[in-house]
């Protein structure tokens, strides 16, 4: 039986910005793994400081980001509340699920923090009303939303910030398929990190599907994020970008 590991994945603009293997899901190990992304970002821009990050509800992940970037605002993923309800009630409590889902997305569509807070409170009251008979598997998730209302509602303070983490979820689905095909990691932590980072580079630089290239005008995720490319050949573009232009090694000693 192999040893379980975790991959601290950072995504922005549908591009994988960081992917590092962590031995455990503890705050200390995740901070170390996400710290690789911070180190690489600061090697490009020493003043790098993200305003927000959207995460799932794993406390260790949230603490790791706060430790690495003390000024960052951690936004809770609204989608994970819905998924938690859907996975536990869609079949067994179908009618309650449909009703709760409709009310939940009505909260999501609120146009202001005040409106959002009011709708969440009404949803919570609906769940607590014993006459409605809302199953515990649904009520528990709604209670979690209500208890963490300040964290969910602060999204309105950052126009343009992501309210869900579905961008990273989509890319991690590809990662999961890749890992399944390769039978996961073999050997050491070093080789595991090299393996997942190599996969991330391919994802970022390999050509997108022809329709996207024709419609959007960019060839790869890297080009979409940076709005330029070093070379017309995608592999040459990867090699030039991956070299970091000597930023890791520092300037050569004068003769």
Image (tube, rainbow, N blue to C red):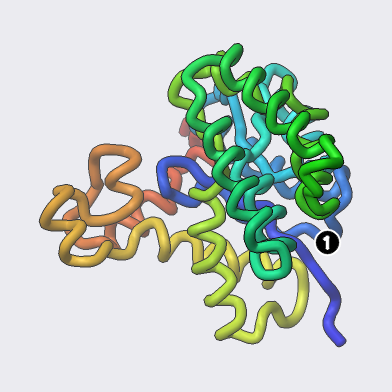
Residue shown at the point (24%, 66%) measured from the top left: 209
Q: Position of residue 168 (x, y in %)?
A: 54, 51
Q: Nearer the viewer, residue 55 or 69?
A: 55
Most foreground residue, 30 or 248: 30
Residue 196 lies, in percent from the top left, at 59, 66
Q: Is residue 2 above or below residue 203?
A: below
Quadrant for the N terminus, please: bottom right
Left or right placement of residue 45 versus residue 184 in this view:
left
For label 1, the residue is 23
From where the camera sits, is residue 172 visible? yes
The answer to which image quadrant residue 181 occupies is bottom right
- Residue 201 in percent (x, y) is at 45, 60
Secondary structure found at label 1: loop
Of residues 30 and 160, the one drawn nearer to the viewer in this rendering = 160
In the image: residue 23, left or right of residue 225: right
**Mark 1, other Cα within 10 Å: few <14 / some 14–19 / many ≥20:** some
Q: Pick the residue in front: 54 or 41.
A: 54
């Amino acid at each position: 039986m192999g040893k379980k590991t975790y991959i601290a994945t950072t995504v922005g603009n549908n591009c994988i910005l960081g992917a590092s293997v962590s031995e455990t899901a503890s705050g200390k190990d995740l901070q170390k793994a996400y710290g690789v992304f911070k180190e690489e970002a600061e090697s490009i821009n020493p003043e790098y400081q993200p305003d927000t990050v959207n995460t799932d509800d794993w406390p260790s992940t949230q603490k790791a980001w706060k430790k690495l970037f003390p000024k960052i605002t951690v936004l809770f993923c609204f989608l994970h509340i819905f998924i938690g309800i859907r996975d536990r009630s869609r079949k067994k409590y179908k009618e309650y699920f449909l009703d709760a889902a409709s009310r939940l997305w009505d909260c999501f569509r609120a146009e202001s923090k005040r409106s959002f807070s009011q709708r969440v409170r009404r949803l919570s009251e609906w769940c607590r009303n014993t006459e409605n008979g809302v199953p515990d598997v649904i009520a528990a998730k709604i209670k979690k939303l209500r208890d963490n209302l300040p964290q969910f509602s602060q999204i309105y303070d950052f126009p343009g910030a992501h309210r869900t983490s579905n961008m990273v979820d989509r890319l991690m689905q590809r990662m999961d398929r890749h890992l399944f095909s390769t039978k996961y990691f073999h050997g050491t932590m070093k080789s595991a990190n090299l393996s997942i980072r190599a996969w991330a580079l391919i994802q970022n630089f390999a050509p997108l599907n022809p329709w996207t290239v024709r419609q959007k005008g960019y060839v790869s995720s890297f080009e979409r994020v940076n709005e330029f490319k070093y070379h017309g050949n995608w592999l040459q573009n990867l090699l030039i970008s991956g070299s970091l232009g000597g930023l890791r090694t520092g300037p050569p000693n004068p003769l």
